[in-house]
Image (cartoon, rainbow, N blue to C red):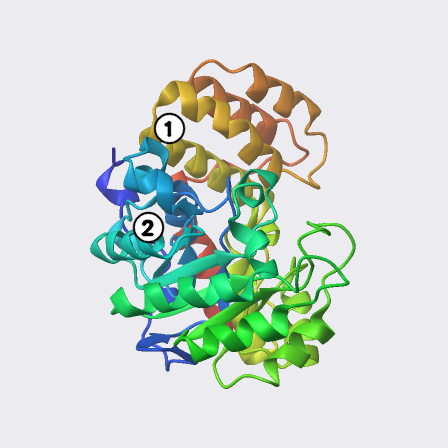
Amino acid sequence: MTGPAACRRPCASSGNRKRVPVLKIGSLQLESLAMLAPMAGVCDSPFKRVVRHFDTKSLLSTEIVNSDALLVGNREMLERIRLHPEESPAALQIAGHAPEPLARAAEIAQEAGADLIDINCGCPSPQLVKSGNGAALMKDPTRVAALYSAVRKVTRVPMTVKMRLGWDVDALTVFEIAKIAQECGADAVWIHGRTAVQQYSGTADWDLIGEVKRTLRIPVIGNGDIFTPEDAKERMARSGVDAVAMGRGAMGNPWIFRRVDHYLRTGELLTEPTLAERIATARLQCQYLIEEIGERRGVLECRKHVAWYTKGLPDTADLKRAVNASQSAQEVYDALARYLSAQPNPEALPDAANVGKLVDAKWQRYQ
C-alpha cells in the first residue's frame, strides 16, 4: 500500500540537486560517499522511503534476500525485492551457497529494478551460517568463486560482494576472497571490519580494511562502527576506502547519510534534527510501516523503531511503555505527540510528510 501523494515523493530539495558523481561502481555513477549497508530488520522499504526525505543520492541496500526462499515464492522474500521508485539508487542483496539458485535470484533482482546486485558473504547470523550462507562462505574460496562467476554471467547491472575479514582471527581470508571477487568480475567489495565469530563485539579493524584496499583495483566500501560524520571521516582517512556504509549507525538515524556525505565533501557538519523533528520522523517511519505491512504487524514493528529514534533522548520510559502497549496506529501517534508536549518548552510537532523539507531548509546555508 502507498500513502498520501505528498508522502510518496522525496522531500529533500537541495538533496535533489544534480551533483558531480564521486564514485563509479561498474556502470553505476554515484553522487554520495555514504551508503546504507544491508542489515536485516533495518533496511526495509519504509525506512528507505524515510531516508529519501533527507537524502536522494545515497545507495540504499535491501535486507538480505535468501535465494532458495525467493525461488519458492516465500512471501517475506518477495516483499524484500519489491522496490519503490524513490528508493533508487538501490542495491539488492542476495544470499545463497549454490551457483544456479543464486544466479536465478540475481536475474529476478534485476527484473525487480535493482541498480546493483550484492552477494552476501558477510552476515554472521547463525540462521544463515548453519545453512552454509553468509559469512560461512568466508571459509570456502572455491565455492565463492563459483558463486561469483555464476552471478556475473547473468547480471547486466553492477555486481558487488559484501564480506567480513574472515571466519575468525586465525582465518583472515578476506585478502583471498576479495581478490577472487575482483577476478570474477565484481565491480566493488564491501568489507565489514570484523570476523564472523566476532559478530558485533569488539571494534572494527579499519587498518586491516585498508590493507585489503591496497591490494585491489576495484572500489572498496568500508563498514563497521560508523555512528557519526566524524567517525566516517576518520575511518575513511585511515583506511583509504572509496566510500563508507552504515548499518547499525543508521538505526533511527535516517539523516546520517546526508550528514556523512556532506562532511566528507566539505568538512562542515550539518545540524542534527531537533527533538520535534526527530519525533515527527519517527511518526513517519511508523506510518510507512503500517501502510506497508498492515496495522497489526506495523504497530508491533513500531516498538523497535521508536526505541531507536528516541535513544539518548530524555525521559522516554513512559513513551516506550505506551508504544509497547499500543494496539492501534493512532495510539502510537498519540504517544509520540504526548511525549513531545511533555518536554520543557515543547515545540509543535511538525507535519510528518514535510519534516524532510523543514530539516533541509536549515541545511540550505551549508550548500
Q: Are marks 1 and 2 in contact (CB under 8 Å)?
A: no
Q: Residue at x 32, y 32 (%)?
A: 75
* Residue at mark 2: 101
Residue 54 image position (x, y, % from top left): 43, 56
On the picture, is 49 further left or further right than 2?
right
Query: In which quadrant of the rendered view does residue 140 lie?
Result: bottom right
Please name the residue shown 63% across and 76% down the image.
Answer: 236
Point out the tag, 1 or 2, that comes first from the N-terminus: 2
Up-down: is 52 above or below 208?
Answer: above
Residue 184 appears in the picture as rendered: yes
Mark sitting on residue 290: 1
Question: Closer to the camera, 298 or 195?
Answer: 195
Going by the numbered disc 2, the residue's amino acid type is Pro
Which numbered mark, 1 or 2, is in the foreground of this view? Answer: 2
Q: Residues within 10 Å of mark 2 (few under 14, many from 20)?
A: many
Q: Secondary structure at mark 2?
A: helix
Residue shown at 54% from the left, 35% from the top: 305
> Which residue occupies the foreground of this view, 209 or 287?
209
